[in-house]
Image: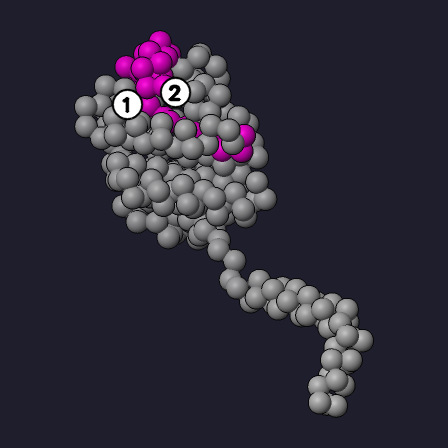
């Protein structure tokens, strides 16, 4: 009985101290856990790490410092678009054409799904390059944009010099096996969506026709945003 009274007196006397000590211990353990838990970071894709069939032979040996090249093309509103439009932005890019009867409609639907997910996010945008710019005029792109629910503030559909677009596909985004350089009879076709970070680096590839991969893309987007503090 005496021992119990002593213990009760002890705990009453040091109650605040013990509670404070417990809180501090929990905080310290939480900090240790966070420090020891590996931070999830997406890979940075370099030319030498991508399927060599998708990479121009002049870049297959490059192991670091690859960035998307600058471009100057025209969007569905007749505006000139360069990479400045994507300064300090994450974006998802693909290559398509408005008259495509096969994979492009599925890709466009999935881009639209992503658009709905990011509509209120001012740090993420979408970018689609036409691989048949001779057909996809500004007027054609605008018509397509209206039909497909493209939000001009979030999503640019680009047309312009065919050689420039094909060079981007082959030497910047690494999305096609075709070696065509944009000549009159050249035609590239790819289902790839490409996740690009604010430093113009490739952080992920996804099959734009696959629902599961679209969900993976959306999950990876959250990881990338966290990395940049967005």
Q: Single out the residue that lies furthest toward the left.
A: 101
16 relative position to 162: left or right: right
Q: Quadrant of residue 73?
A: top left
Task: Between residue 212 and residue 74, name the one nearer to us.
Answer: 212
Tell me what residue is drawn at x 74 percent, y 80 percent. Answer: 8
Q: Single out the residue that lies furthest toward the front.
A: 1
Secondary structure beneath dot 1 equals loop
192 relative position to 47: left or right: left
Tell me what residue is drawn at x 53 percent, y 26 percent. Answer: 85
Tell me what residue is drawn at x 39 percent, y 32 percent. Answer: 114
Image quadrant where one finds the C terminus: top right
As displayed, is residue 107 above or below residue 19?
above
Secondary structure beneath dot 2 equals loop
The span from disc 1 to disc 2 (Cα, nearest Å) is: 15 Å
Which label belongs to residue 97? Answer: 1
Q: Label 2, on which residue? A: 150
Give the residues in magenta: 122-149
Q: How is the image coloured?
A: one colour
Image quadrant where one finds the N terminus: bottom right
């Amino acid at each position: 009985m005496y021992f119990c009274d002593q213990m009760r007196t002890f705990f009453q006397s040091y109650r605040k101290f013990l509670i404070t000590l417990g809180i501090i211990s929990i905080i310290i353990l939480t900090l240790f856990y966070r420090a020891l838990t590996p931070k999830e970071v997406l890979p940075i894709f370099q030319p030498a790490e991508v399927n060599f069939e998708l990479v121009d032979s002049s870049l297959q040996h490059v192991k670091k410092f690859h960035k998307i090249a600058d471009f100057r093309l025209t969007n569905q509103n007749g505006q000139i678009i360069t990479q400045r439009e994507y300064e300090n932005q994450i974006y998802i890019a693909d290559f398509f054409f408005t008259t495509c009867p096969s994979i492009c409609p599925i890709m466009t639907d999935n881009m639209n799904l992503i658009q709905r997910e990011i509509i209120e996010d001012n740090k993420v945008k979408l970018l689609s390059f036409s691989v048949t710019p001779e057909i996809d005029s500004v007027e054609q792109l605008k018509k397509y944009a209206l039909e497909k629910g493209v939000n001009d503030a979030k999503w640019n559909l680009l047309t312009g010099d065919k050689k420039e677009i094909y060079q981007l596909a082959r030497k910047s985004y690494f999305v096609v096996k075709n070696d065509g350089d944009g000549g009159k009879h050249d035609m590239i076709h790819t289902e790839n969506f490409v996740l690009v970070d604010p430093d113009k680096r490739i952080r992920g590839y996804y099959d734009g026709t696959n629902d599961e991969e679209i969900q993976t893309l959306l999950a990876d987007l959250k990881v990338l945003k966290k990395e940049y503090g967005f």
